[in-house]
Image (spheres, rainbow, N blue to C red):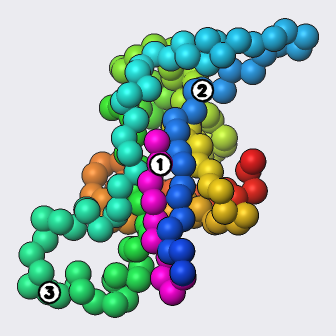
């Protein structure tokens, strides 16, 4: 699967970014080989991953009365900015005093594959819903940002730590 971004002021204004979901990390034990089929044993279908979509779509319900959709500052800030949706619904219930996290969705294996306790004292947890992005360009930065154009319980009760990856250097 792929999506194409447009560059301004270029003769060839197309940059192709390829993407795919990645299986949960299942590293082989030392001295043991892993078959590709080991990576296909997921608790949910790969087809549940959504295509990245332009974040401007989050405002498609808004009328243009405020004229922000044509404002150059807005247009420049959202062009080539895409959102990712979780591939499936998942709930997490926290009891920070007992250092206990529970989910009523899926099973322990799914929980272990997708929830990483980084630092319980600081309430730092990583949700691992892995995507891989790559391009034929020599260098292309992909920036991970909080979902500031979305409004839901997850976004309103979490802090996303941003990061930048040069996906042109991955292969």
In the depicted view, which residue is nearer to us: 62 or 96?
62
In the depicted view, which residue is nearer to us: 154 or 94?
154
The image shows residue 75, relative to residue 107, as above or below, that is: below
Q: Earlier in the sequence, mark 3 or mark 2?
A: 2
| CB atoms of marks 1 and 2 within 8 Å | no
- Which residue corresponds to the image point at 61% horizontal and 12% vertical from the top-left? 37
Q: How far apart are marks 1 and 2 (CA)?
A: 21 Å
Q: In this view, does 60 lie to the left or right of 149?
A: left
Callout in the foreground (1, 2): 1
Q: Is residue 15 left or right of residue 38?
A: left
| CB atoms of marks 3 and 2 within 8 Å | no
What segment is highlighted magenta in the picture? Answer: 1-10
Q: Which of marks 3 and 1 is nearer the N terminus?
A: 1
Q: Mark 2 points at which residue?
A: 24
- Which residue corresponds to the image point at 61% horizontal and 34% vertical from the top-left? 116
Instruction: Find numbered disc 1 in the image and state the secondary structure of the residue it sits on.
Output: strand
Point out residue 86 in the picture as x, y percentages from the top left corner: 39, 40
Q: Mark 3 points at which residue?
A: 66
Q: Distance between the residues labelled 3 and 1?
A: 33 Å
Point out residue 51 in the picture as x, y percentages from the top left corner: 38, 45
């Amino acid at each position: 699967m792929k999506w194409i971004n447009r560059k301004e002021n270029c003769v060839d204004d197309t940059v192709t970014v390829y993407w795919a979901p990645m299986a949960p990390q299942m590293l082989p034990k030392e001295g043991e080989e892993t078959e590709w089929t080991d990576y296909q044993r997921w608790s949910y279908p790969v087809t549940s991953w959504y295509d990245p979509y332009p974040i401007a779509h989050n405002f498609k319900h808004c009328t243009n009365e405020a004229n922000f959709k044509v404002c150059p500052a807005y247009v420049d800030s959202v062009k080539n900015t895409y959102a990712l949706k979780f591939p499936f619904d998942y709930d997490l219930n926290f009891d920070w005093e007992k250092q206990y996290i529970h989910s009523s969705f899926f099973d322990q294996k799914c929980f272990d594959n997708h929830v990483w306790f980084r630092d319980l004292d600081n309430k730092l947890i990583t949700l691992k819903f892995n995507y891989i992005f790559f391009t034929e360009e020599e260098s292309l930065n992909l920036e991970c940002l909080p979902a500031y154009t979305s409004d839901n319980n997850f976004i309103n009760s979490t802090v996303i730590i941003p990061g930048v990856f040069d996906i042109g250097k991955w292969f």
